[in-house]
């Protein structure tokens, strides 16, 4: 029974390459032989630090691609005895249990894309609801002797590398002073790690604000996925940002990444100096490396009352205030996650290369909330936000039968647009994309299988219309680039080619049926190398964050219209590019997704999230 549990416990399956030759794709598009597309420069000894970091990132991205003949380096088998504990705990830190709200007591999901409700105050009730709707456990599953947990925020292989912290003003029944706490999802509680100076929030942020910090434990993902695990950690950061943004919206709160801060400031403000420095080995090695369980600081999110404008964040004052956090009286020691480890050194070299520096000149901008488009309101089941996010599941299989109407398809895609109802798509103004402080860099190539009223084929959703000309020039000359029938004027969706692409999408997604058995699947294509050169190498993980936020919307939209979805991390990178005609490294596919009718395994028992069984799974 254990092996069966492990299959469903890790739904984003990574298939090792077979010893026999893989079958070629069957499609009307001719594929040239696989080729290396990422550009790299000459020896790093002749490069300045910025160029050396760029070379490291491009090398990582190229090295961790899957191809028809070879997969990215990973474990030959899974070391179940050392599967990482999915629950970080701070031993001896004061524990403050949170409240368990009623399941239906929240605003309708689809209403949040039109306007945010009046902001609620910060108190134990609202903080409890916020975590319950974003990062908490959503259920336990059981079959035979195997039991495992699910969460509101999805994760590659259900491995959950993302940890969360709250930095908050005083909250009655939690802390009489401002505090830093780690969120413990297994028990839905806060582990208070430090008290902070009284003037921290009043001097720096608007009333009713608090901070959420997100971190990644790379070991949790690399345990299963090896070198490609760094990608998946950043997908999961994006999913967490999306989950946090939607839960905050339900309270009438807005969210924005504080992207002027650097790696060092994030490390201090979340108390991550408790972890020993990890010395990166020269090659991939196996052994006992307790330091490998450290948490990499990803981002700090400001959560504040919606509708507030005219305030700024002074990053110099914030940096000075955070510099004092090293002197706080930090409580709790992090628990151990595994007895032995495998260090995939390229992950840690790349994480060093993409550390963001402090950028004091960066302006903190709050854009007006932009509502998202509507063309088929009747497509939604009108579920409350809490019910929807807590019932979200990753489909393990699709039924190959379920279809959706064309207008439902268009409605889902309207909520995938970063700029909402703006005339042109570019700036991220709509929910939940507005949490990200950069223009959209991610587009979607769609494989349409079962959409009633829309021909099967290849389509493209342009999410930053300034890229349209570059995309058209970079892709195959025979593509049509025509708006499909009935497409809303404000939806920049284009038909590329009419064809049955079920086999194609399956083969491109590591031969997984789930990519062809849904209503549609898609690949998220990002503008990679130009973004890294123009904005900084530290944008590399942020491109994956953007795909994760978009993936979170796809999950919620699918469930909101009565079907399901699943993220697909295993796909053949360059064959995807070859189908589109892309060469070079300007545009790269970073994440795949499928949406359709799920196959429910009735042998699996669903148990309440709380109180859960006493297992770490």
Image (spheres, helix red, strand yellow):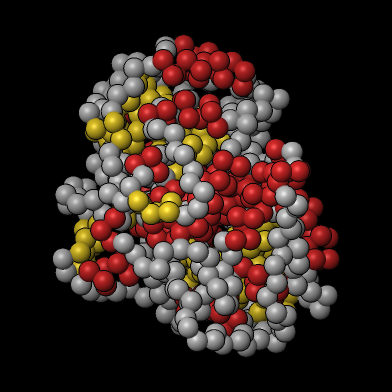
Residue visible at 31% across and 51% down? 340
Would residue 286 be found to the left or right of residue 80 on screen? right
Residue 335: where, in percent of width, then height?
Answer: 27, 39
Would residue 129 be found to the left or right of residue 448 on screen? left
Does residue 505 appear in the picture of this structure?
A: no
Instruction: Please state which of residues 526 and 604 is positioned toward the viewer in this rendering.
Output: 526
Does residue 289 appear in the picture of this structure?
A: yes
- Quadrant (top left, top right, bottom left, bottom right) of the N terminus: bottom left
Residue visible at 35% across and 51% down? 287
Quarter occupied by residue 527: bottom right
Residue 240: where, in percent of width, then height?
Answer: 46, 46
Residue 92: where, in percent of width, then height?
Answer: 22, 28
Instruction: Please state which of residues 249 and 316 is positioned toward the viewer in this rendering.
Output: 316
Relative height, residue 254 to residue 292 (above, below): above
Residue visible at 64% across and 50% down? 57
- Quadrant (top left, top right, bottom left, bottom right) of the C terminus: bottom left
Residue visible at 64% across and 55% down? 59
């Amino acid at each position: 029974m254990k092996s069966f549990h492990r299959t469903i416990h890790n739904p984003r399956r990574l298939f090792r390459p077979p010893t026999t030759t893989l079958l070629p794709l069957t499609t009307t598009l001719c594929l040239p032989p696989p080729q290396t597309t990422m550009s790299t420069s000459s020896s790093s000894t002749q490069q300045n630090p910025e160029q050396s970091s760029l070379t490291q990132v491009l090398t990582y991205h190229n090295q961790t691609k899957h191809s028809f003949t070879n997969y990215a380096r990973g474990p030959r088998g899974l070391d179940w005895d050392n599967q990482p504990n999915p629950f970080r705990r701070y031993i001896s830190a004061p524990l403050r249990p949170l409240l368990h709200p009623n399941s239906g007591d929240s605003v309708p999901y689809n209403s949040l894309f039109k306007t945010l409700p009046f902001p609620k105050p910060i108190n134990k009730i609202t903080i409890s609801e916020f975590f319950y709707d974003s990062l908490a456990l959503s259920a336990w599953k059981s079959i035979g002797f195997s039991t495992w947990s699910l969460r509101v925020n999805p994760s590659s292989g259900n491995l959950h590398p993302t940890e969360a912290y709250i930095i908050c003003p005083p909250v009655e029944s939690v802390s009489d002073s401002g505090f830093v706490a780690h969120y413990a999802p297994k028990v839905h509680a806060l582990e208070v790690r430090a008290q902070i100076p009284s003037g921290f929030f009043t001097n720096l942020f608007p009333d009713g604000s608090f901070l959420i910090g997100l971190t990644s434990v790379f070991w949790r993902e690399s345990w299963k996925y090896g070198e490609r695990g760094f990608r998946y950690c950043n997908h999961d950061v994006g999913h967490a940002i999306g989950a946090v943004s939607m839960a905050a919206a339900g309270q009438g709160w807005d969210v924005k990444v504080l992207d002027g801060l650097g790696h060092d400031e994030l490390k201090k403000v979340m108390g991550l100096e408790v972890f020993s420095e990890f010395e990166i080995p020269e090659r991939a090695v196996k052994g006992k490396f307790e330091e490998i369980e450290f948490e990499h600081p990803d981002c700090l999110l400001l959560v504040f009352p919606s509708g507030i404008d005219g305030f700024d964040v002074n990053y110099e004052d914030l940096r000075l205030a955070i510099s004092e956090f090293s002197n706080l009286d930090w409580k709790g020691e992090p628990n151990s996650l595994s007895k032995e480890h495998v260090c995939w050194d390229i992950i840690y070299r790349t994480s060093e290369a993409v550390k963001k520096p402090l950028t004091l000149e960066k302006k903190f901008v709050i854009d007006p909330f932009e509502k998202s488009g509507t063309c088929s309101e009747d497509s939604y089941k009108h579920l409350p936000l809490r019910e929807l996010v807590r019932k979200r599941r990753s489909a393990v299989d699709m039924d190959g039968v379920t279809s959706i109407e064309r207008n439902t398809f268009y409605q889902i895609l309207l909520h995938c647009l970063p700029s909402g109802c703006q005339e042109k798509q570019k700036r991220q103004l709509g929910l939940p994309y507005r949490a990200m402080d950069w223009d959209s860099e991610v587009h979607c190539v769609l494989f349409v299988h079962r959409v009633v009223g829309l021909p099967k084929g290849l389509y493209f959703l342009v999410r930053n219309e300034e890229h349209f000309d570059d995309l058209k020039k970079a892709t195959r000359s025979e593509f049509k680039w025509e708006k499909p029938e009935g497409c809303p004027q404000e939806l920049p969706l284009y038909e590329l080619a009419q064809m049955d692409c079920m086999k194609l999408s399956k083969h491109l997604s590591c031969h997984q049926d789930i990519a062809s058995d849904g209503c549609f699947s898609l690949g998220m294509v990002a503008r990679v190398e130009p973004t890294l050169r123009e904005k900084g190498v530290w944008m590399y993980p942020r491109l994956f964050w953007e795909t994760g936020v978009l993936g979170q919307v796809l999950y919620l939209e699918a469930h909101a219209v009565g079907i399901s979805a699943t993220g697909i991390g295993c796909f053949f990178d360059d064959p995807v590019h070859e189908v589109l005609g892309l060469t070079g490294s300007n545009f790269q596919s970073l994440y795949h997704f499928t949406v359709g009718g799920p196959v429910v395994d009735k042998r699996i028992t669903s148990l309440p999230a709380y109180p859960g069984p006493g297992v770490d799974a």
